Amino acid sequence: MTKHTIILQPSGRRGQADEGASVRTAARALGVDIESICAENATCGKCLILIEEGRFEKYDITSKREHLSPVGAEERAYLERRPKLLKDKGWEIGQVRLSCQCKILGDVLINVPEESRGNKQIVRKSASDRPIEVKPAIRNYFVTLSPPSLERPIADWERLAKGLETSMQLVHGVEAKIPRWREFTIDYRCLQTLAKTLREAAWSVTVSVWNNSEVVAVRAGFHEDSYGAAVDIGSTTVALYLCNLRTGELLAAESEMNPQIVYGEDVMSRIQYSAEHSDGLEKLHKAIISTLNKLLKQAVRSANMSLRAEPQTANTKRSLSELAIASDKEPARHRNDININDILEMVLVGNSTMHHVLLNLSPKDLGHAPFVPTIHKSVDVKARELGLSVNPSGNIHILPTIASFVGADTSAMILAEEPHKQDENWLLIDVGTNAELVLGNRRGLICTSTPTGPALEGAHVEYGMRAAPGAIERVQIDDATLEPKYKVIGVEGWNTERGGLAGRVKGICGSAIIDAVAELFRVGIIDSRGKFKKTLEPASSPKGKRIREGESGWEYVIAWAEETSIGHDIPITQKDVRQIQLAKAALFTAARTLLKHKKLESPDKIILAGGFGSYIDKEKAMLIGLIPDCALENVYAVGNSAGDGARIALLNIEKRNEIDAVARSVERFELPTDPDFQNQFMLATSFPHMSEPFEHIAHLIPNRAPDPMAKNFMK
Amino acid sequence: MTKHTIILQPSGRRGQADEGASVRTAARALGVDIESICAENATCGKCLILIEEGRFEKYDITSKREHLSPVGAEERAYLERRPKLLKDKGWEIGQVRLSCQCKILGDVLINVPEESRGNKQIVRKSASDRPIEVKPAIRNYFVTLSPPSLERPIADWERLAKGLETSMQLVHGVEAKIPRWREFTIDYRCLQTLAKTLREAAWSVTVSVWNNSEVVAVRAGFHEDSYGAAVDIGSTTVALYLCNLRTGELLAAESEMNPQIVYGEDVMSRIQYSAEHSDGLEKLHKAIISTLNKLLKQAVRSANMSLRAEPQTANTKRSLSELAIASDKEPARHRNDININDILEMVLVGNSTMHHVLLNLSPKDLGHAPFVPTIHKSVDVKARELGLSVNPSGNIHILPTIASFVGADTSAMILAEEPHKQDENWLLIDVGTNAELVLGNRRGLICTSTPTGPALEGAHVEYGMRAAPGAIERVQIDDATLEPKYKVIGVEGWNTERGGLAGRVKGICGSAIIDAVAELFRVGIIDSRGKFKKTLEPASSPKGKRIREGESGWEYVIAWAEETSIGHDIPITQKDVRQIQLAKAALFTAARTLLKHKKLESPDKIILAGGFGSYIDKEKAMLIGLIPDCALENVYAVGNSAGDGARIALLNIEKRNEIDAVARSVERFELPTDPDFQNQFMLATSFPHMSEPFEHIAHLIPNRAPDPMAKNFMK
């Protein structure tokens, strides 16, 4: 058989192709996937390519089109339906082709535009900046069937399954692993509307296949996109990300307070609530489901609004071929509105209690020794079983739990950060009311959890509050004057730069509490044991006014009453400092115990996950000994890592097996079983630590000698 | 390793066994399965064997017990809990052993009592009297788990799955194909109660596994039995069979009228109803589901009543080991009551319309050309999806449909009769308002259906009625006097033997109509074209009274008004004869067309399925040409073949794949596409046929010359 050379840009792949093979087939053989949904019917337009100008052996620039079969009637019809695209891009028919239609008749140099490339990737910010390959569980195939006749009265499902097999072979190539038509299954709910849809669609439908095996949606006509939602259910906040399952694009991100808060602030009190009330679990379960349904609706609305608002940007950003549907006339975009029924999959994560309540499993046994979850393994369940308002045939995937207090959110964090693929030893910390810690590398991971109390999130602190407008989020104290300056959420710059913030301050949030305690220590107002040094300045002097004996002991005033909207001075009190000491000692001891168990002095990298990690000042966190000593450039704040992990699992089905296996292999370590735990905890209450050098922030540590006045630590 | 000879009675299997192997293991190696559920814990007692007296080489009768390990403490404890069993059977401990506990130390001769044998079989009456091997989809395993501890806080599901793997290995042997624990799945609903059940059961549970892969029930303690229901949904009658899934035993059979009758008598009118009313399908669907739930409840009640009524019989018939639970004290039997929640599987069959309505699929497209079902393939769906009141995690299996008018009931009939395994060509006929016909052998089956009208079931006949008390079911006419005699349902013997049946007769049912028409033809009252010959007897003579000109033409009186409860003479009219002619011509032509297509003169066997087939007189049916000519001893009436097929699929999971494959391969033949159809139909309206010899009933056919008076056939 005659062979021709084909070169594909921008990848530069080069090879020989059989004469008469389509460019798309030849490209696939060279490892360059070009998208296609329409089963090579010249209707989806996803496989557009450009016949490049270029110079290589035997290539005849003057007759370049003769190296490919001429533009056929269907191909021309498709391209002529898209004058706007051709005009915008400056392409002419013949230069731009459908790669499924043009056959190779000579050597060719092809450019595959970004929009047409298969195996899409998304990039997320993380410690490692890895691209995520988009390999969704849901794939769409356009199938055109011949209608049944008296001669061939085969049933609808069998007819569809046969058409689907053919379509999948055309899209993926005959060498790909595609089930035979008899092996496909169809979700029962989807079967119920099949006959009607096929006839209304005049036998041309888009079939959405889950995991290469189960038909979960059949829609009339051509639809290139399906949607999915990734959700991180925190005890406090629920965050939902709506994604395009084909492109991986994030279309909307929505969040809401977790409504279960009315049944208890932390997981233990919710476990207790569910155990003490016969309808407790049901109430908790229904609360989260209805919030998820609300978020789904909001996300769809947001996505549709932004699609309508910016049709141009959306078009070019998204896909060339969507225009084929919307046609080139605006504002036809509305026809492409996302329908909540087009959400065909969700991936959810959360701590073990949130996981159990979501699945309507009693969390009772998570709350008492020996602290056992109902299931570790990931769970797949139909949306209708949970009452989620997406497509009832859609799959809901819940990531695996690792232990009673190391849940699916930690699994997601591992999936997002990938410590199990590193040579270095990484320490992952997700800080909340509980902190979960994971340490290790490709040779094994170990995890634990520790209660840190709510102080680090700004709760149980005298004037503490959640991160919200009006909250102080940064504090600095002048070495000489001991005067503070601060930043407030919702206001740009330091208070001192704006000549005061009369009436704007409401309280102080977690990151600022850490700042304040670290600064009090650094400038010498509190000693390494956390005790206020009594000031010798007169009470009327500026320093004497700031550092004063309040109702419940010594305190340092950050904001005066007139700067606030609450009419009170906002101080950091001795009690607040103690709260921080307890929290940081718990976290540090957990980290130290894991390090000891792995026979490590310190981790190679520290990754702080969660909103909290993103806002704290790494240097100050280390100064108070919240995290182990480590070069500051190796401390990363990665934001909502659990949410990212959920999104990764949503967009790439292979990642689900990966995290199932990794979660199973993570070693669980129970802190109280370590004999040295109590002792370590006591040492860790000091700033930064009683017995560790903390070399990387040593220059900030004041005189290390313990204050002789502080005799009775912690009373 | 030392080997010993083991002989197993009654199978006579003989072979060598390793010293120290348990008798159960050794027997399995020789192909003799002994039951066990408790994973060799000496608690289920299903593997009881008898150490036989016997004489063979090296066998030392005086020390026979030393050829086996001594009775251990647990085994003794089990046997001592069953004094009644030992007393009734005359067994002593040591002679009777648990085969999982006793180890082989020398040559042994073992008797495996029927109750202990694995691979149980049930036998059904049919043309071939085949035994059905019991290989249910649901199997129970008793699993005892070590409770979780702080040292091993593995989750409940993973703990159970590991225990299940071990248990299955013990029951089936390590060489059997058993999934690894990670491959098991658990139904979502079952998962929801798992934690509670395990703890209430103190970690000893019976796990019901579906299809060797999915856990569908976890029950506290030891339960050897699970139950299943097989259902045949007829257009008129719904029949449900409750079975023990372990033994195959039929525990109850219940039937009800199909409540959909109020929406239309035949399938076409129900299809129309569903098409014309927006809530039509929903009403039809709900009607059948609520009837099924009613039947399930009734069946459970009946089964429990008979279990309580005959505890002795039930015990010996069922299983020795049930006593282990009930203990030997009566009436503890109630503890073994069947709970509707223990019904873990159902298999349903019905014609295509019943199939669609059951699954809540619109039957609309079944009712118009090209007559297409939504699905051919068998369907598996969870009970809760259909609202059936059995265990919500239970599987509902619906057999495959073959064509729009050849439904899952025909699939079930094929499964029950097995024409696809024969060398001979069998003709299967299921007669109802529609008749379905299947013809062929192992080289291929062909099927068709034909509307026969309701006449054969006694409807649309002047005084016709369904088979019910008061209906005439048999008719004979005296050759000389032309006087009839008849039998009535609910009354023994002929009317003439009882000196009349004043006031007992209500009408005439299908089988008697065929009798009457055949007899009228045989004695010469009607001719071969079905036309009444005008009698020359005076109207006042006995013959003249019987054969008379009524309101709508000539008729023959079978019962006088005074014999009835309706106060009217009951005749067979010319119109009735015409109805039968049309029906039998349709059926015969369908059979003839299939035979022609297969190039056959006549079938080797004719199998009449359905209640109708059981009651008709084969000879008379052949005399009127209802069925093709065939030796009478090769015509079988097999009763509710569809119900039997459903039961077979319920009890043997392998049969489901078999019928799925066979149903797919059956060739569908549309009668109207046969060019000779009209012509054949006309020829077939004659008695027995215009052009076929009907050799096997030739002696009953009167003079074949057409009556010269009957010029205008069918006027």
Image (tube, coloured by chain):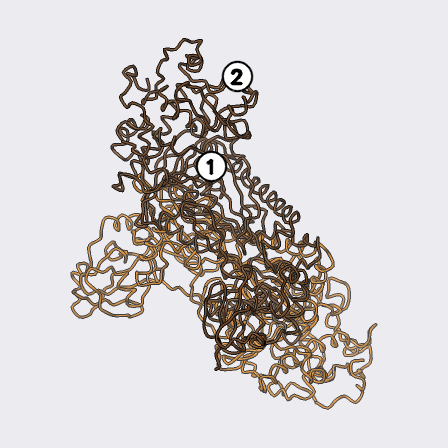
Chain colours: A brown, B orange
Identify the residue at horizontal 29%, vertical 18% (top origin).
A707
* Near-viewer residue (A708 or B13): A708
Q: Which residue is mark 1?
A: A611
Residue furthest bottom in the image: B705
How far apart marks 2 and 1 lie (CA) works out to 29 Å
Q: Of the residues tagged 2 and 1, which is closer to the observer?
A: 2
Q: Quadrant of the C terminus of chain B?
A: bottom right
User: Residue B593 occupies which quadrant of the picture?
Assistant: bottom right
The residue under label 2 is A561
The reply to whether residue B230 is in sight is: no
Q: How many marks?
A: 2
Identify the secondary structure beneath mark 2. helix
The quarter of the rendered structure image containing the N terminus of chain B is: bottom left
User: Which residue is more in the foreground, B584 or A322?
Assistant: A322
- Judge from the rendering whether residue A633 lies leftward or rightward of residue B345; answer left or right: left
Subunit bearing disc 1: A
